[in-house]
Image: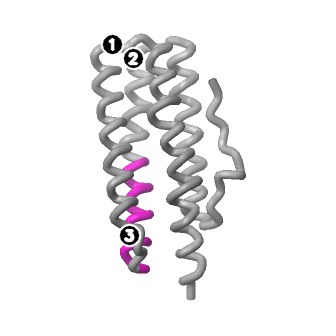
Amino acid sequence: MSFTWNDNLAVGVEEIDEQHREIFARFDKLSLACQEQHGGDVVKELIDFLHEYVEKHFAAEEALMQKLAYPGLAVQLEQHAAFRKDLDALTVENEQGMDAHKLSLAVDRRLVQWFILHIRNLDSEMAQFVKSHKN
């Protein structure tokens, strides 16, 4: 299963799009590591990276939305919290020895699909607001 970035997901705010591309690149690496049944250390390293990078990404988005008094901030915060919860649960499942194939499917179902829907629905709306309030 490949999780390649698709330019149709671009929201038009370069900093955010760049971060989204990096997150998708890491999803892809995580999926490949699971499929190739690499050791748990590789998978753990990729999950740890996602934890760190997603925090950085969400913090950047949230700071931008706060700065511009974005009216959809509360929904974004709620959705970001839901993603963190899923990522935390996936981390626990990996630590408990979840089968690599099941982990790969869970990454797709719970993380990648969430991100795709989040970008298409909430981030694209937020990006339009940001672009209309630049300058």
How many other residues sit within 10 Å of disc 3, few (<14), some (14-19) or many (≥20)?
few
**At 42% from the left edge and 63% from the top edge, which residue is drawn?**
60
- Where the N terminus falls, by quadrant? top right
**Discs 3, 1 touching: Cβ within 8 Å:** no
Query: In the image, what residue type sits under mark 3?
Result: Ala
Which one is nearer the viewer's eye here, 129 or 44? 129
Query: In the image, what residue type sits under mark 2?
Result: Gly
Residue at the disc numbered 2:
40
Q: Which residues are magenta?
A: 54-68
Mark 1 to mark 2 CA distance (whole Å): 8 Å
How many other residues sit within 10 Å of disc 2, few (<14), some (14-19) or many (≥20)?
some
Which of the two discs, 1 and 2, labels the residue nearer the N terminus? Answer: 2
Mark 3 to mark 2 CA distance (whole Å): 34 Å
> Which mark's residue is nearer the viewer, 1 or 2?
1
Residue 126: image location, x then y, percent: 51, 67
**At 36% from the left edge and 14% from the top edge, which residue is drawn?**
98
Residue 111 higher or lower than 99, as above or below: below
How many other residues sit within 10 Å of disc 1, few (<14), some (14-19) or many (≥20)?
few
Residue at the disc numbered 3:
63
**Discs 3, 2 touching: Cβ within 8 Å:** no
Residue 6 position by quadrant: top right
**At 43% from the left edge and 14% from the top edge, which residue is drawn?**
39
Checking the image for residue 97, the label placed there is 1
Whether residue 56 appears in magenta in the rendering, the answer is yes
Residue 127 higher or lower than 50, as above or below: below
Checking the image for residue 119, the label placed there is none
Mark 3 to mark 1 CA distance (whole Å): 36 Å
Q: Main secondary structure of the magenta part?
A: helix
